[in-house]
Amino acid sequence: MSAGSVLAARETQGARGLLSRLWAGRTKYLVGAVCLALCTIMLTPLVLSILASFKSTAEAAALPPVYIPSAITLDSYERLWTYQAGLPTYLGNSFGTAFMTIAFVLLLTVPAAYALARFPIPGKELMFVLLLLALIIPYQALLTPMFLMFAQFKLTNSLIGLAILHTAIQIPFSVYVLRNSFAAVPRELEEAAVMDGANSWQVLRRIFIPSLVPAIITVALFAFITSWNEFLGALVMMSKGSSFTLPDRDQPRRDGLGDAPGRRNHFHHPVHRRLPAPAEVLRVRASQRSSEMNERGTGISLGVALWSQASTWPEFLGAARRADQLGFDHVQTWDHIYAIFGDPHQPIFEGYAALAALAQATERTRLGLFVGANTFRNPALVAKTMTTIDHISGGRAVLGIGGAWFELEHRAFGFDFGSGFGQRLDWLGEAVRAIRTLLDGGEVTSDGTGRYAFDHLRLAPPPLQAHMPMMIGGGGERKTLRIVARYADIWNVFGLPETVNHKNAVLRAHCADVGRDDAAIERSVGCKVIIRSTEAAAQARYEEIIRHNRIDPERLVDDITWWVGTPEQIAETIRSYRAVGFHTFLCETPAPYDAETMETLINVVKPMVEGAEVHA
Amino acid sequence: MYANRRSKWIGLLYLTPALLFVLAFTVYPFIQMIWVSFNNWSLITPPRFIGLDNFERAFGDDQFWISLGFTLKYTLIITPILMIGGYLIALLVSSNSPLRRFTRTVVFIPVVIGLGVSSLLWYWLFSSDFGFVNRILLDLGLIERPVLWLGVDADRSNLAIIASIVWKVIGFGMILFVGAIQAIPTEITEATMVDGASYWQRVRRVILPLTRRTVLLVTLISVIGSLLAFDQFYIMTAGQPHNETATSVFYVYLNSFPYLKLGYGAALSLILAAIVLSFTVVQMLLTRRSEA
């Protein structure tokens, strides 16, 4: 109908002489200026994006962005050409679907419109309304049953299935336009043909179709636009996982990355397979139905812990802002003053100063250290610093602390490293007790038997938060978990699900012993996540990061905290931890910071995980 | 002329494929959706009939109301902008000087771009660090430091998305309005000129009433499009912060697919379809009245 009125409008441009006379005179310049302003506004986004497409990667990521590229490169186009399955594949998919849609639409609606316009069929009006039904029911509403039906006939993940969906969307418009066009063809033409003995099919082919070419082109064009641009249906019907035909984990690898000596399996638990997303969710549901799910339900919290090594401040700041914007619950960074991965003499930033800056630069995420090294500073000073950060951030501070372990930095800075783990943990216990009291507005005086010598110490102002959470990291069963049981609000630990499950049981015992409700402690798992749509791409990214941070890959062979894989795999890993009661995932994020992983974690993995068990 | 029994069957033969297609891929899913909406079904266990529980639950579901409220808010803000803006541009460019024809083309370009593509484009433009919206506003001195447009504050995200959608679809209404304005017979406009009516009088008394049908049609298309908005929100905010920018279709999608609450998703779909249908009916009534 829209095309119809546009066509009609073109034929009646008689008004134009008049209207231009109307606007003649002084208004002419005003109109010209408004037109030009309008064009500028409309074109700017397009021009900027076209210009940006010729920038080099470095220039495209420049802060602040530059308007005009300094040199023209085709790198972006090259990368696009080979991105994931490759541009040709995606273009082929889109064109294939669109042309099938055009074919289906025309084959169905041309005869139907012919029948509706020219044949005396009883109940014709009712059938017409039936054909227009999709106009009244939003197709978005029909996606669930369509998906179920398509799944039954194996039409999900097939271009034909998608083309059928697009055809269903497009039928009402096409029938409407074509029926009107058929009705507009003079009857004399077909009467003459019938006189000559033509049957209805010949009339359709010889008389109608030639005189309906413009209408048919309109219908085909709109079918193409609908199919080419349609998003939600494609999102639902075509699950990402299976649009790539990457070899299954069990099959020999052809990508040159697999099965090399020393390559470890990033996933120990359980065995992963590629499955389309909804099917994946189903499978996990089935396997987890009967089991566990504690009172927290399926919700998870996500945080990023940005590595402060091998980075620059603008990159670090950008990553923290991005994480904040994406909705991560925590943004954290290390408290190390020598790089702990790879070459220890790489650049690295100090933790509290970085946090203070982030407190100003972010808006809603919680901020803390992952985790503060107790040996570096007087713990009361730490409480003071974090209180200040709590004020700067508007009450978003989390005080993260642990016993510290990296001897080299202690030696280099001349910090007391103590006699061993045991002593450092004794210090930690004393420190944490004092910090809790100070944060809660109490006064601290040391009894002279411990490491610290506080004297009627109070903090003013108190933190903004009535109860600033304390996060304690570590899995030492005798001392650390004892401290956790007494003081921690968040407990972070590393390890395989069965390991952390065991630690969790020990923690529960300590809690029972000290008389604390263990449900009050948020369980967090530390991990290093790299997500790409294919395992090979994730592995490639992993290797890039290892190189950038100057890490000897051999040293990470047994490090199970790297979760490298597809969204489905990461989701399954997260579920396996959630199954043992861990709902917070603090994802260490090495430089160069990985926006794709952060975005996928929040936008794809999180819904995937949270949807898996709801309503069971 | 084919008025005999045989031609009736021939006609039906031409009609059958399309009818079967619609029965299979529109009517059947619709009926199935109604049935699913009375069940609790997650695909694993067989569906369990629970009557109207899903609908009852929808009425008590805060997130559903938040989504619906947000969608209505979005629709209420964007529709007047699109209608009035589109109409003013149409008045501006409806005559055929080269500059106006060029402007018309330029304003129409974004309509041809897919919604997904334009959403990605604006997602990039609104990026707080890399985006040109902040860069331009900073250069013009309108803001002092980069603004976090998307995903942090619901109203700000809404504003950013509305700006992007206005850019994307204002040309659609414009082109239909231009068609309608140009279709007004020259004699009528000339007669009003002879009567000495000013331009704005002419717009109000002649052009607007004579294009009323088109205005109603574009309003309906625009309102339905806004009520069913999904792509732009999915891409630009993903419902953040805290699902405050999740539209109704987004919430249906979340329930039906990632959460696999199929029965509940179907019930929400039906409620949504009923709302859209009521808008369609109101529009039809208005059109009929304007013709009478």
Image (tube, coloured by chain):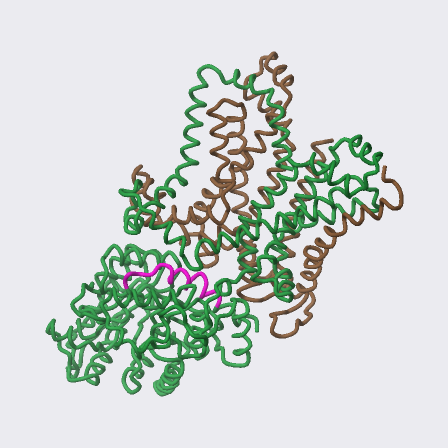
A10 left or right of A61? right
Instruction: From the viewer's side, name the closer residue of A40 and A266.
Output: A266
* Residue located at (83% from left, 36% from top): A194
B26 left or right of A446? right
* Residue located at (52% from left, 71% from top): A280
Q: Colour of chain A?
A: green
Instruction: From the viewer's side, name the closer residue of A375 and A461.
Output: A375
B108 left or right of A170? left
- Residue A14 vertical placement versus B6 (above, below): above
Instruction: From the viewer's side, name the closer residue of A553 and A89.
Output: A89
x, y (%) of residue A251? Answer: 45, 75
B106 left or right of A357? right
Q: Is residue A595 magenta?
A: yes
- Residue A258 vertical placement versus B267 (above, below): below
Q: Which chain is brown?
A: B
- Residue B169 vertical placement versus A360 (above, below): above
Q: Main secondary structure of the magenta part?
A: helix
Q: Quadrant of residue A438?
A: bottom left
Q: Is residue A257 magenta?
A: no
**Magenta extent:** A591-608
Which residue, as the protein is rendered here, is positioned at the far right? B5
Please identify the quadrant where the C terminus of chain B is shown. Answer: top right
